[in-house]
């Protein structure tokens, strides 16, 4: 009996030791590229060539690269363009996703089932696949080099995926809530806005995040639809600094990455539980 | 509610129908149309119908670009998906052990690659893989390995691409698998343990069967997503050296916006979409994951 017990404890120790080892290695790998870019941004080394193992543990910290990105590059022009597109995308996506999701969940619409499956399958279509025809279409509608064209292009995918999420979420809310409001004299549309919309807040917030990220981190569409420099977005500016110009301004690119990426990462980690719940709601089962 | 009311309810769906029509169906139809023309920058205003010529060109090209692109897309998709799912599942199993401490610390750290915008991470990785100056060659130099020309040698380029993609994606898989594992009732394991079932038996008889639907769903949607995942190849190798790591979707984009061959590019993206759609239908049918949806 004693020996079986010992064998068990030994097995447990080995199992846990291996577990901690694997977890620690994976944690280091997960964090390393971000650590590397933060450190590079705080280092007074201009080019990729001067990044070394020694610069991973710098002796002194410099904010020159941050000064460079904020005041010597047209960062605020890029930021403005990115934010306008992100905001437009958020507004359209949330409105369309909510209306569609509410209608698909609550209303009797002929052909609803087929429509839901169809919308679901559309979410698999990548935006890059429609970029060429959109480019031609936007060219003939004079939407190249405009905010509208890109906002429309960004909104389509998020609206559809969002509608699908809103639909599953509203399915879990009993219809008595808005029915009570309608008995009190509200029209169906206003009952949705006043009663259902506040209850779907978590999903709406998620769609806002998704819409924001879609517009804020897109390069492929912006690169295709924007030709004039004053319409450049953050990602276009970043590509220029990282790829075209990495031999001279690498620490400026690093500072750029930190300014652009770390806030998103912080939001994501802060709301991770909730974001993961939405993802498992949409597909886990 | 009468039938009239049902038709009226379409009012709520007008915006999404407009979006689907103008931003999905019309562009797709248009792409099909221009793939049958000689539309390019040189024929921007006056292009004409040329039948299946683009498709025939692609399929009979003496350099066999198409075969190579298809092969590369398969290597990229399957080569990424298998390690991502195995690693994701393995880490989820480790994190699901009840006697493990600091679970949340480890898990939050694993979320970083998912939380940091992938586009920026890829630009960072492209600097890290650099042959002459990259930090990865400097790190492996510590254990005496000579610098590797990661992005300019086909084999190493695939290793770099897939490792980067695994880094980007494993948190998603770990997270989905972990939440599925946590939904398996603990009592099942307790009963099995009382009955004397060992670790492997419990894994094979409880964990795997309970995880089957999640694994299948995540596998199929991961396959579709990876097939169309544009940025890693576009940023890290641009399909190079030559076209040896180029995949269909990236090549189609380059054909359009680097070489201005819009018609040929459309034909490539249509072929890619048709192949993917056929495989998706087969996988959906076979796995029945769309049943009970809606």
Image: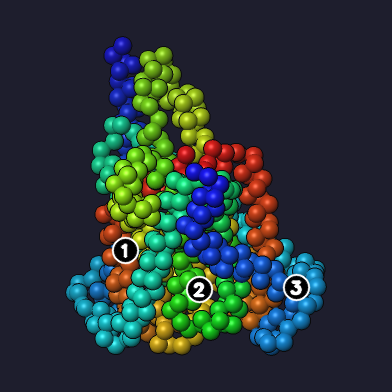
Quarter location, residue A245: bottom left
Q: Depth check: A254 or B263 in front?
A: B263
What number is the disc on residue B36? 3
The location of residue A112, given as percent across then percent down, is 55, 48
Q: Residues within 10 Å of mark 3 (few under 14, many from 20)?
A: many
Residue indicated by mark 2: A221
Residue indicated by mark 1: A264
Q: Is residue A214 above or below residue B198?
A: below
Q: Residue at x 37, y 15 (%)?
A: B194
Q: Is residue A8 above or below residue B8?
A: above
What number is the disc on residue A20? none
Q: Examine the rendering and report whether any part of residue A93 can be seen.
A: yes
- The chain letter under disc 3 is B
Q: Residues within 10 Å of mark 2 (few under 14, many from 20)?
A: many
Foreground mark, 3 or 1? 3
> What whole-number distance in Å separates the C-alpha atoms at marks 2 and 3?
24 Å
């Amino acid at each position: 009996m004693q020996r079986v017990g010992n064998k068990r404890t030994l097995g447990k120790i080995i199992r846990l030791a291996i577990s901690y080892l694997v977890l620690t290695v994976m944690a280091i790998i997960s964090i390393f590229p971000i650590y590397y870019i933060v450190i590079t941004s705080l280092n007074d080394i201009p080019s990729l060539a001067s990044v070394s193992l020694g610069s991973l543990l710098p002796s002194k910290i410099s904010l020159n690269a941050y000064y460079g990105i904020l005041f010597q590059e047209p960062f605020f022009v890029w930021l403005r363009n990115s934010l306008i597109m992100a905001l437009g995308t958020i507004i359209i996506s949330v409105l369309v996703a909510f209306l569609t999701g509410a209608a698909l969940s609550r209303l009797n619409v002929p052909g609803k089932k087929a429509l839901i499956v169809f919308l679901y399958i559309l979410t698999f279509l990548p935006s890059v696949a429609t970029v060429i025809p959109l480019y031609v279409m936007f060219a003939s509608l004079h939407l190249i080099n405009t905010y509208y064209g890109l906002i429309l292009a960004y909104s389509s995918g998020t609206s559809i995926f969002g509608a699908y999420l809103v639909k599953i979420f509203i399915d879990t809310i009993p219809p008595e809530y808005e029915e009570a409001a309608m008995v009190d004299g509200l029209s169906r549309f206003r009952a949705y806005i006043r009663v259902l919309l506040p209850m779907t807040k978590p999903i709406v917030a998620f769609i806002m995040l998704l819409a924001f990220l879609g517009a804020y981190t897109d390069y492929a569409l912006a690169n295709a639809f924007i030709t004039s420099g004053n319409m450049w977005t953050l990602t276009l500016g970043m590509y220029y600094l990282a790829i075209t110009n990495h031999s001279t301004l690498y620490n400026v690119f690093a500072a750029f990455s930190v300014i652009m990426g770390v806030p998103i990462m912080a939001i994501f980690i802060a709301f991770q539980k909730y974001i993961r719940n939405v993802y498992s709601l949409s597909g886990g089962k | 509610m009468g039938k009239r009311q049902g038709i009226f309810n379409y009012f709520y769906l007008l915006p999404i129908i407009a979006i689907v029509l103008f931003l999905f169906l019309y562009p797709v139809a248009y792409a099909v149309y221009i793939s049958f023309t000689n539309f390019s920058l040189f024929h921007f205003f006056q292009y004409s119908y040329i039948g299946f010529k683009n498709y025939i060109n692609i399929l009979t090209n003496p350099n066999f670009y198409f075969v190579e692109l298809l092969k590369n897309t398969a290597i990229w998709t399957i080569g990424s998906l298998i390690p991502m799912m195995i690693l994701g599942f393995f880490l989820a199993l480790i994190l699901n052990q009840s006697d493990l401490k600091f679970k949340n610390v480890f898990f939050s750290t694993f979320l970083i690659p998912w939380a940091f915008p992938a586009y920026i991470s890829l630009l960072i990785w492209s600097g890290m893989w650099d042959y002459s100056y990259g930090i990865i060659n400097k790190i492996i130099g510590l254990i005496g390995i000579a610098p590797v020309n990661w992005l300019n040698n086909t084999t190493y380029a695939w290793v770099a691409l897939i490792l980067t993609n695994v880094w980007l994606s494993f948190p998603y898989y770990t997270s989905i698998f972990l939440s599925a594992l946590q939904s398996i009732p603990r009592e099942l394991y307790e009963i099995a343990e009382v009955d004397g079932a060992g670790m492997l038996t419990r894994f094979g008889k409880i964990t795997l069967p309970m995880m089957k639907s999640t694994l299948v769903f995540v596998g199929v949607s991961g396959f579709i997503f990876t097939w169309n995942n544009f940025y890693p190849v576009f940023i890290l190798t641009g399909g190079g050296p030559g076209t040896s790591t180029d995949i269909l979707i990236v090549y189609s984009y380059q054909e359009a916006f680097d070489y201005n061959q819009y018609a040929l590019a459309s034909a490539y993206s249509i072929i890619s979409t048709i192949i993917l759609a056929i495989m998706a239908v087969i996988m959906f049918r076979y796995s029945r994951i769309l049943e009970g949806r809606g």
